Each structure stands twice: as C-alpha cells, then as structure tokens.
Amino acid sequence: MNRIKTLLFASVASALAFSASAATLDFTDTGDSSGLLGTVGWSLTATGGALKVKTVFDAVVPPDGTLAFNYDGAGVGDDEVTNAGESLILKFTQAIFVTGVHILDAYVNKTDPGVQESAILIETGGGQFFEIFADDVHDGTLPAGYAFKAFAKVAVKSITFLAGPGNDSILAPDFALAAIDYAAGPDGQTPAPIPLPAGGVLLLTALAGLAAARRRKA
C-alpha cells in the first residue's frame, strides 16, 4: 500500500507540479551529429545524401540570433536541405517537449515577397505540425537567412525536417537546420519529463483504492 501511495504521489507531482525552463540544442555550435541532453540521447541523420554539419559559418551574424554561429547548421550533401528528396531526421531516446526551431539559409523571393523558403516539421509516424518561413531577403550582403519560430510545446521522440516548396529564385528551395528549443528540467539541460496523462493518474488512483479495499477485507 505504501509503495502504491508513493508511486501515486510521485506521478501526481510530475504531472501537476513540474516547472520547466527553456534550453537549446544548437547545431551551429560544435557541429555534432549526436550527443546527450543531460541524460537524454539524441542523433541527427539524413536521407537523400550525406549529413553535413561542419560547414563554417560565413554570413553576417543576425542581430536577433542567440546561437553560436560557428557552423552553418545541418544540411544534406552540403550545408542545406533541398526539396529534391532530402530530409533530416532528429531522434531522441525518449520523448521531449520541443518549443521552437531556428533555421538558416532560407530567404524571401526578391522579386516576389509573397514567396518564401521554409522548413516543414513532421512528427515521425504522424503529420506536419509546423512550418517556419524565411524572413531575410538575399540582397548580396550575405545575410544568414536566419528565422526562428516558437510554438506551443509539442511532445516528440522523432522529427523529420523537409524543405517547403517556396523558392528564393536562387537555385532550389532549401534551408539549413540551425537549432531546436526544448523544455528543460531543473538542471537546465536534461529535457523536462512528459507528464503522465490524466488517465494514467486516475488509473494509479484506482489501483490505490483497490489495494486499500483488499487491506480492509484482510
């Protein structure tokens, strides 16, 4: 009975009382393709070509950028993901809350501002849940093509990144994956745990009740 109570209280505390902070997995920092976020492992792979993560950053650092900008982000074959059958797949050893994505090398069409390059996010095994559109115009001053979008936290274990159909009129539609933001736990690095669904809490409550009833009968 005491063990069931302990499990119940721990689950309720995790589901209701957890407070998360923001953290970033920055692909422009060390150029790694795998690693650890505290105790949670991650890996980045590519389809349609070889993964490229260590192209030196050679553009103008965006004034609103908060990344390292040592490297030009992740791409396929080079430092970009095109819409010609290329994609990036980011996997975690357990589900985490993703709260935002940073991209580079994505531009607005100079002659048609209504057309923007973009990155499409797909939860592997599910459907598209977000699209990030370019903000920069490629005007010859080497802008980084940086864009960032935050969104309500989404619990994912794997994300596929694809280039959207919009083209800046310079070669193919493309972008580079710069970073993701995620909800972190108290140490500021390990991803925050996914709270137990309400149904799970109710199940534990029911189990605790059954154990108490059996004890009274005994």
Image: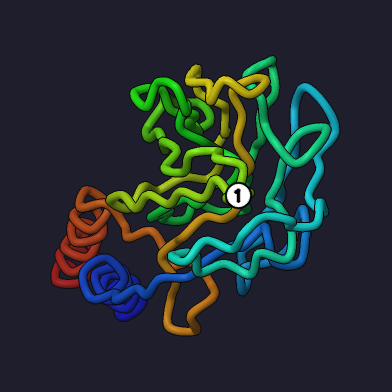
Q: Residue at x 29, y 76 (%)?
A: 19
Q: Which residue is drawn at 38% across and 58% down?
A: 194
Q: Which residue in the protein does label 1 denote?
A: 141
Q: Is 37 in front, or is 6?
A: 37
Amino acid type, residue under disc 1 in the picture: Thr
- Please tell me whether residue 48 is drawn above or below residue 54 in the rendered image: above
Quadrant in the rendering for residue 80: top right
Most extreme residue toward the front, as rendered?
140
Position of residue 74 measured from the top left corner of the image (x, y, whole percent): 70, 46
Q: In the shown orientation, is residue 118 left or right of residue 45?
A: left
Position of residue 178 measured from the top left corner of the image (x, y, whole percent): 60, 52
Position of residue 107 measured from the top left corner of the image (x, y, whole percent): 51, 36
- Please tell me whether residue 8 is drawn above or below residue 75 in the rendered image: below
Most extreme residue toward the bottom, as rendered?
187
Q: In the shown orientation, is residue 121 left or right of residue 140?
A: left
- Which quadrant holds the N terminus? bottom left
Position of residue 207 measured from the top left corner of the image (x, y, whole percent): 24, 58
- Please tell me whether residue 151 is drawn above or below residue 68 in the rendered image: above
Viewer can see residue 206: yes
Colour scheme in use: rainbow
Q: Which residue is drawn at 76% across and 33% down?
A: 76
Alpha-carbon neighbours of circle 1 within 10 Å: few (<14), some, or many (≥20)?
few
- Which quadrant holds the C terminus? bottom left
Q: In the shown orientation, is residue 71 left or right of residue 161?
A: right
Q: Residue at x 19, y 61 (%)?
A: 205
Viewer can see residue 123: no
- Please tell me whether residue 185 is drawn above or below residue 121 in the rendered image: below
